Image: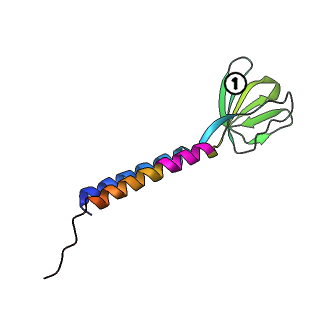
Amino acid sequence: MKLSQSKMFGTLLVAAILVWTSGCTSMQTVPMPGKQVPAVAVGEKVSVTTVDGQKLAFKVTAIEPDALVGNGIRVRYQDIAKLEVRRHDRNETGTVVAVVGGALVVAIGYALSHMPPPMMGP
């Protein structure tokens, strides 16, 4: 493989890894069951819109009987109008894997088709 082909392949590989690692999560709306504890776990990243329109984003560090807590923020369940949680998205992961895999197959095929034939001995 020539140097320029190696650079192209390396660039595609790095791009594929970046896309793969960044595209597998999405914000998912979590229903708010009145004043009960919502389906959220400690360590998850949340986006909260309060009933008065304030938007907050934080990593949940504690789940109290009446509030979510994280990064010095405490939001009572009754004050939450909309709750979203960043979670793994299987559909998005499948799409990313298909796109990255396809790009790698094309890149490898291109590199192999542009390789010079092997040198034959005397």
**Along the horizontal axis of the image, is 102 left or right of 38?**
left
Question: Can residue 91 be seen here?
Answer: yes
Please state the horizontal and vertical placement of residue 39, each as a whole percent of the image.
79, 39
Give the vertical position of 121 relative to 2 (above or below).
below
Q: Quadrant of the N terminus?
A: bottom left
Residue 98 falls inside the magenta stretch: yes
Please state the horizontal and vertical placement of residue 55, each as a whole percent of the image.
65, 24
Q: Residue at x 25, y 63 (%)?
A: 115
Amino acid type at circle 1 is: Thr
The extreme left residue here reads 122
Q: Residue at x 78, y 23 (%)?
A: 79
- The boundaries of the magenta stretch are 91-99
Kind of element beneath mark 1: strand
Q: Quadrant of the C terminus?
A: bottom left
Q: Nearer the viewer, residue 112 or 40?
A: 112
The kind of secondary structure the magenta stretch mainly shows is: helix
Question: Can residue 6 be seen here?
Answer: no
**Colour option used:** rainbow
Give the vertical position of 9 relative to 89 (above or below).
below
**Along the horizontal axis of the image, is 6 left or right of 82?**
left
Q: Residue at x 35, y 52 (%)?
A: 11
Please state the horizontal and vertical placement of residue 44, each as a whole percent of the image.
69, 42
**Residue topped by disc 1:** 49
